[in-house]
Image (cartoon, helix red, strand yellow):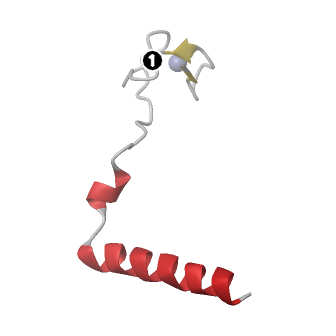
Amino acid sequence: MKICPTCGATVPQEAKQCPECGSELPVENKEWYKNLTPTEVFLLILGSIMLMIAVVAL
Ligand SMILES: [Zn+2]
């Protein structure tokens, strides 16, 4: 369940529209990583490796 930002009604998690006021709801993108460009994926992996090195080094 999530809450409509317009009227505050509880709406089903998968609902794209509020059944109470009919306003469009922001859809949570669970597959956000699919929108990443190869450069962003590379930077994300690089960042993870740097973080691991930092953790090990400390
Ligand atoms: Zn609403």
Residue 40 at x, y percent in the picture: 35, 75
Q: List the single residue furthest toward the front.
A: 56
- In depth, the one of 5 and 29 nearer the eye is 29
Q: Is residue 15 left or right of residue 8?
A: left
Where residue 13 appears, as percent x and y from the top left, is 46, 22
Residue assigned mark 1: 18
| In the image, the residue with mark 1 has its CB under 8 Å from the nearest atom of ligand 1 | yes
Identity of the residue drawn at 57% across and 14% down: 10
Residue at 28%, 59% (x, y): give it: 35
Seen as rendered, the residue at the extreme top is 20
Q: Is residue 26 above or below residue 48?
A: above
- Rendered view: 1 above or below 20: below
Residue most toward the right? 58
Please identify the quarter of the rendering in which residue 25 is found. top left
Q: In this figure, what is the number of numbered marks?
A: 1
Query: Which quarter shows the N terminus?
Result: top right
x, y percentage for residue 52? 57, 79
User: Which quadrant: the C terminus?
Assistant: bottom right
- Mark 1, Cα crowd under 10 Å, few <14 / some 14-19 / many 20+, is many
Using the rendered view, name the quadrant where residue 57 is placed: bottom right
Q: Residue at x 59, y 14 (%)?
A: 9
Residue at 60% across / 19% down in the picture? 7
Q: Pick the residue in front: 48 or 2.
A: 48
Q: Give amino acid for label 1.
A: Cys
Task: In the rendered view, tell whether residue 45 sits above or below residue 33.
Answer: below
Element carrying mark 1: loop
